[in-house]
Image: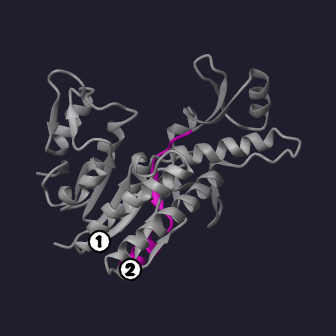
Amino acid sequence: MKQRIVLALGGNALGDNLHEQMLAVRGTAKAIADLIADGHEVVVAHGNGPQVGMITLALEAAGKTAAKTPYIPMSVCVSMSQGYIGYDLQNALREELLNRGIDKPVATIITQTVVDGDDPAFLDPSKPIGAFYTEAEAKEMAARGYDMKEDAGRGYRRVVASPMPIDIVEKDVIAALLHAGQIPIAVGGGGIPVKQVEGNRLKGTSAVVDKDFASAKLAEMIGADALIILTAVEKVAINFGKPDETWLDQLDPAMAERYMAEGHFAKGSMRPKVEAALGFVQSGPNRRALITKLEKAKEGIRGETGTVIMNN
């Protein structure tokens, strides 16, 4: 059955540097093309951790030179990462589809994610970004308005908030492309974080949005049937890494809430994926989420593997 799917790529789908990315997207394109060849409407979302870190480090290094390149806001760094990841990804997917005789345009959408300026995350920025600084350099950065925190004795780093997404600005553009039979790449890196200010103005903010939560919000807003969150493991597990480790084929909301309360899913890895999947499933009727490996996406959407999260 044809489904509208938002596919959230994990970091292993993109590599850690320019060369790795160019190689990784070829394999990634094959997995995405499998879903498209089966007749599904697919939106491709992705993370940007290594890429936005590389951009930030390069710009910060330039800022320390005699050229005094101005420091670039986090929102602009995210937009840069969307462009260069999208460039490689859309070309690889276009080539793979044409090699299969599928003529469908692929386009990267520079996507903005609206966050609430009163989100509690802004009270305690904790996401480290960019280079390490000495205490003196950190004080200078703080004087410029950046939040700086000491990092385990290694120096000081800039930190930003990680607020929850409340809207996707380009959702109607993305839906229109799907309706036209095209393939959008969107909410890269969780989307460019923006706040609604006076009137109709959107303003970038010093934050990063989790790509799984942004993907779930997009899936909700475009009426997707399924959210697929791709990660390094084939299924979600409880007691992960322990002798009584158990891999899960299916979760309902009550089970997911109980396992999270019991501390089974690590905050920095599987927990946000489960939370995002759960949020999407509960956002409307007949919605389901799947967490699995990239190369298992096709089998997963057929119900043959992965962990499915759905209402009973």
Q: Secondary structure at mark 2?
A: loop
Q: Which residues are magenta?
A: 161-178
**Which quadrant would residue 6 be assigned to in this image?**
bottom left
Q: Is residue 293 visible?
A: yes
- Residue depicted at x 43% and y 58%: 25
- Is 214 rendered above or below residue 139? below
**Which quadrant would residue 217 be assigned to in this image?**
bottom left
Could you tell me residue 157's position as x and y percent?
Answer: 65, 30
Q: Quadrant of the N terminus?
A: bottom left
Residue type pointed to by label 1: Ile
* Marks 2/1: CA–CA distance: 9 Å
- Residue depicted at x 43% and y 70%: 184
Q: Which mark is residue 240?
A: none
Left or right: 33 with respect to 82? left
Left or right: 98 with respect to 91? left
User: What's the image's color scheme?
Assistant: one colour
Q: Nearer the viewer, residue 18 or 299?
A: 18
Q: Pointer 2 and pointer 1: residues touching (CB < 8 Å)?
A: yes
Left or right: 179 with respect to 22? left
Residue located beneath label 1 in the image: 36
Residue located beneath label 2 in the image: 104
Could you tell me residue 210's position as x and y percent?
Answer: 45, 46
Residue type pointed to by label 2: Lys
Per the image, is 171 magenta? Answer: yes
- Is 85 rendered above or below residue 270? below
- Is 132 rendered above or below residue 282? above
Left or right: 258 with respect to 112? left
